[in-house]
Image (tube, grey):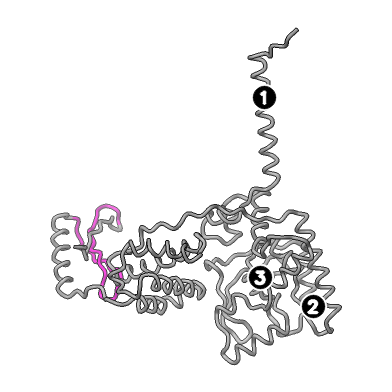
């Protein structure tokens, strides 16, 4: 039987002795501690056993509920603590889990159910990475149930995600970056020539230059306001937004607020764009017409936090058109961020510095998904191997001369 109360021995505040504490979960699922005021091991164990009996006399066994009720309860408890996109993915994962094993009681979920779900994801056509992502969301939901006292243990804690081959990181070359910027400039000129004077297209060239300089995510760029740009210090601040009459609620991924430097050319371009922007439009990259449309939707209550993650229209289609004009294939907008981060690393920035500038919680994320092997690194490796192999050949020749027939 699982213990409801455990002992914890910790130093006193003066550091001269130890004190035992009772650790337990109360009726609301919160972790509590109770000081015993002494360090007598036998006495502490008697207190623990007594308190254990008292809890068991009035304890309520973990509540039974169906998986559908469990996920609803979990989402309601965490809706203000995590991103709406994360909540949506957790809900989708649980719905798939229910389709596979049925809407059973949470107390009946076993390790075997997780194995069956992982295989069902693969059988249904999900990529191994997608199946692994669904499993991570499910594990997190069940672990929260354990933390709240709804479950004694996480039934999926030992489920391993399907193995996924490491993908090649797509990084644009200098030539591709130049072609992309030229195509974006030509696209802007063409759109301005075709539309009336009041038409304001997306500033694709400035967007691309900014992400190549700062590594900002698309949502971070599109939710940048003029207040985030400091023209004096030549910096751009990645900051969350609150729900005000002028701005909509938006949260940074991993809640990592940070400041990045801008080049002189970028500062000049932002200053020029600001002079063209009408008063009352706080966002840098949201067109005037699109902002008016969003404000109308907000006025009708038809706007959510999730809508603020990607507040533009036809972003992918516009970027795909620019890629086609530049004759560049197999590139996403996020690859521009990968290009910037890889260039930082290639130009001497330390691992921790790159991680902080990129806004990652740990360097493993930076390394796994963003740092590509640059061509210059490949060339240096080839040159080093050539030098070593030449030395090996010379040494071998001196030690074992060739027998040349006379």
> In this figure, which residue is indicated by the disc labeled 3?
221
> From the viewer's perspective, is residue 54 above or below residue 352?
below
| Mark closest to the chain's N terminus, 3 or 2 | 3
In the image, farthest residue toward the right: 193
Identify the image quadrant of the C terminus: top right
Residue 275 is marked as 2
Front-most of 94 and 99? 99
Circle 3 or circle 2, nearest the eye: 3
x 55%, y 78%: residue: 306
> In this figure, which residue is indicated by the disc labeled 1?
391
Give the x, y percent position of residue 86: 49, 71
Circle 2 or circle 1, nearest the eye: 1
Give the x, y percent position of residue 285: 71, 75
In whole angstroms, how far apart are the C-alphas of marks 3 and 2?
19 Å
Q: Is residue 26 magenta?
A: yes
For the record, the magenta segment spans 14-39
């Amino acid at each position: 039987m699982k213990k409801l109360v455990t002992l914890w021995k910790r130093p006193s505040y003066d550091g001269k002795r130890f004190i035992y504490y009772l650790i337990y979960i109360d009726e609301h699922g919160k972790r509590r501690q109770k000081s015993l005021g002494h360090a007598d091991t036998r006495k502490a164990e008697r207190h623990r056993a007594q308190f254990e009996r008292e809890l068991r006399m009035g304890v309520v066994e973990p509540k039974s509920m169906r998986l559908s009720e469990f996920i609803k309860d979990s989402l309601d408890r965490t809706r203000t603590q995590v991103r709406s996109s994360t909540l949506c993915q957790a809900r989708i994962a649980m719905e798939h889990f229910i389709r596979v094993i049925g809407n059973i009681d949470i107390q009946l979920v076993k390790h075997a159910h997780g194995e069956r779900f992982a295989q069902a994801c693969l059988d249904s056509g999900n990529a191994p990475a997608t199946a692994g992502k669904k499993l991570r969301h499910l594990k997190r939901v069940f672990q929260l149930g354990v933390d709240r006292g709804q479950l004694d243990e996480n039934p999926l804690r030992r489920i391993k995600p399907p193995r996924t081959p490491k993908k090649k990181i797509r990084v644009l070359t200098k030539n591709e970056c130049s072609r992309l910027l030229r195509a974006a400039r030509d696209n802007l000129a063409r759109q301005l020539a075709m539309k009336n004077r009041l038409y304001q297209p997306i500033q694709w060239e400035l967007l691309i230059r900014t992400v190549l300089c700062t590594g900002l995510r698309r949502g971070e760029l599109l939710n940048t306001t003029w207040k985030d740009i400091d023209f004096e210090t030549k910096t751009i601040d990645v900051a969350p937004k609150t729900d005000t009459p002028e701005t909509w609620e938006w949260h940074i991924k991993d809640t990592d607020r940070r400041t990045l430097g801008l080049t002189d050319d970028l500062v000049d371009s932002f200053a020029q764009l600001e002079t063209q922007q009408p008063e009352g439009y706080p966002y840098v990259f949201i067109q005037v017409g699109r902002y008016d449309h969003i404000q109308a939707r907000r006025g009708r209550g038809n706007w959510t936090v999730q809508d603020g993650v990607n507040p533009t229209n036809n972003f992918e289609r516009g970027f795909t058109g620019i890629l086609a004009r530049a004759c560049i294939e197999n590139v996403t907008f996020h690859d521009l961020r990968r290009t910037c981060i890889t260039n930082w690393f290639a130009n001497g920035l330390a691992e921790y510095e790159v991680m902080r500038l990129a806004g990652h919680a740990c360097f493993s994320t930076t390394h796994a998904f963003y740092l590509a092997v640059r061509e210059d690194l490949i060339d240096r490796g080839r040159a080093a191997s050539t030098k070593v192999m030449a030395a090996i050949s010379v040494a071998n020749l001196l030690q074992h001369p060739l027998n040349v027939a006379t």
